Image: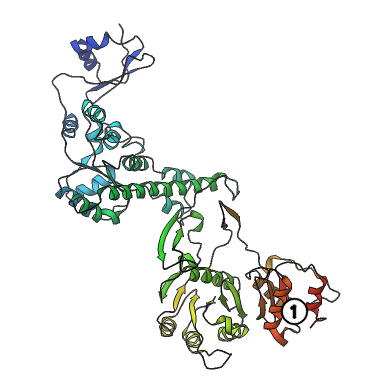
Amino acid sequence: MPISLLNSPSRAAALAYASTAASSSLRSQLSPRCFIHQHFQNRVFFTCKISSRCSLVPVRAMAGTETDSQASVSSVSTGTKQALISLSDKRDLALLANGLQELGYTIVSTGGTASALEKAGIPVTKVEQITNFPEMLDGRVKTLHPSIHGGILARRDHNHHMEALNAHGIGTFDVVVVNLYPFYDKVTSSNNISFEDGIENIDIGGPTMIRAAAKNHRDVLVVVDHNDYPGLLEFLKGNQSDEGQFRKMLAWKAFQHVASYDAAVSEWLWKQSSGGDIFPPSFTVPLSLKSTLRYGENPHQKAAFYDDKSLSLVKAGGIATAIQHHGKEMSYNNYLDADAAWNCVSEFDAPTCVIVKHTNPCGVASRANILEAYRLAVKADPVSAFGGIVAFNTTIDEDLAREIREFRSPTDGETRMFYEIVVAPSYTPKGLEILKGKSKTLRILEAKKTGRGLLSLRQVGGGWLAQESDDVTPQDISFKVMSQRAPQEEELSDAKFAWLCVKHVKSNAIVIAKNNCMLGMGSGQPNRLESLRIAFRKAGEEAKGAALASDAFFPFESQNHLIFGEQR
């Protein structure tokens, strides 16, 4: 019967094949719809378009001939321990490879990793020697081959898996060490990467190998983090008490690594294709553990702090990325309070001090002289300020640091003010030195201003609420005068200041302010009238002529009477 030869580099090789007794026997079993599909490196592969009687069969084209490539394939099926290494991040590669070699592993590698190993004088078998197929499509196809994935995915306790490997001359891999193209770094760089370059930095072969090895973790150790190289080598030396747990942890880490990578790709593609819609139908938030905390909101609750690795938050600033220069480790409540203080003080353009207690600003003041602003912020509510968080939007220099360290409470003029946290955008060396001398436990944070236009998330039972961040400032608002008398410029300035303060006070929220200084505030009361009374009590006589801001309207006449003095 006729045989159609496609892509053959040698018609003579095909004729030699057809003349053998083996090929005659095989041809008698093939339907007329079977063709020689591909011939390369002394191998001919058959495939059938319809007939179910045909399967993929490798056959040597020239009897009695074996190339170097075939010799390498034969060698990998003899039970040699093999490690597959393919890395974009090549940190500690020599440490890993030398350690594996000392333990008797043959190292198989790809492209740049193989070149790096060769330069380091470490013997390496290239992947194409295993697959008998060259890297192609600009590197898109290197490891996507049965000779690689068969050796990763085969279960050693399934005889038919091992028989299949032996039938096709495929060796097993015992260790797979892979990390991925630096997609995250590329698309968040300042180089304005093009869409086409972004697409080319999406790894395909790497995640496939990682997932395959993680799935078959009972037989294959998978490593995606250079920090795990020492632990891997110790495990291979037999220094591990719980083998199953170690393998499971590596597998979990591998799947999490790929999941975070895919989350970045998904976020980037949504931004490229959504037309500005900030609410995708579904999305993943990639979180990375930064620290475990002593306890949560209450002592009986365990807690931890995570960095958000979303692309949108790269270089977005905020407390999560703050540098801690001094003091005790941060607690759960410390993070909440520091975040509230930093978000509030970052709203102001003029030099400003904000003091927060239990996430509410209890003192806010803006002045050209930051020392004066600090004193006024404390004076607003010195009892609440004691043990609070103090934040500045200016550099803390020697003079300000000394004032923070030595300032006495206005309540008695003797007690030094105590704070849990000081946060500022920067410190002079001398200022930082002086501030460290205030207390061994004082947490000193250096933070960058939180970015605008971000997505705000809040958890509810069984779900999350998402909204745009509240970036509106008085400069974005046109104030409409509703009274018979128009406010004077300084009165309008006080109203804007109070409005910006009340934005950060928990509802029901009232702020009384004058001359760019908070005089009193009431927060968190179910009854707005109670918040009014608290704010007026704190402001005292200074409330006369001040501006009052509320986070909502006043529905009852009695509230208006209290504001305008009829009940005072």
- Give the side of residue 568 with respect to residue 112, left or right: right
Residue 549 x/y as whole percent: 71, 73
Q: Position of residue 416 (x, y in %)?
A: 50, 89
Q: Quadrant of residue 351?
A: bottom right
Please determine whether, in this image, residue 283 is positioned above or below residue 438: above
> On the picture, is 369 further left or further right than 405?
right
The C terminus: image quadrant: bottom right
Q: Is residue 531 visible?
A: yes
Instruction: Give the farthest residue toward the right.
Output: 484
Residue, far top: 1
Name the residue at 19% across, 31% down: 73
Residue 20 in sight: no
Q: Amino acid at mark 1?
A: Glu
Residue for point 27% across, 8% down? 28
Residue at screen point 59% across, 54% down:
466
Q: Farthest residue to the left: give it.
A: 64
- Give the quarter of the figure containing the N terminus: top left
Residue holding disc 1: 491
**Viewer-closest of 506 and 53:** 506
Decide if residue 132 is on the left or right side of residue 212. Answer: left
Q: Position of residue 181 (x, y in %)?
A: 37, 47
Q: How is the image coloured?
A: rainbow
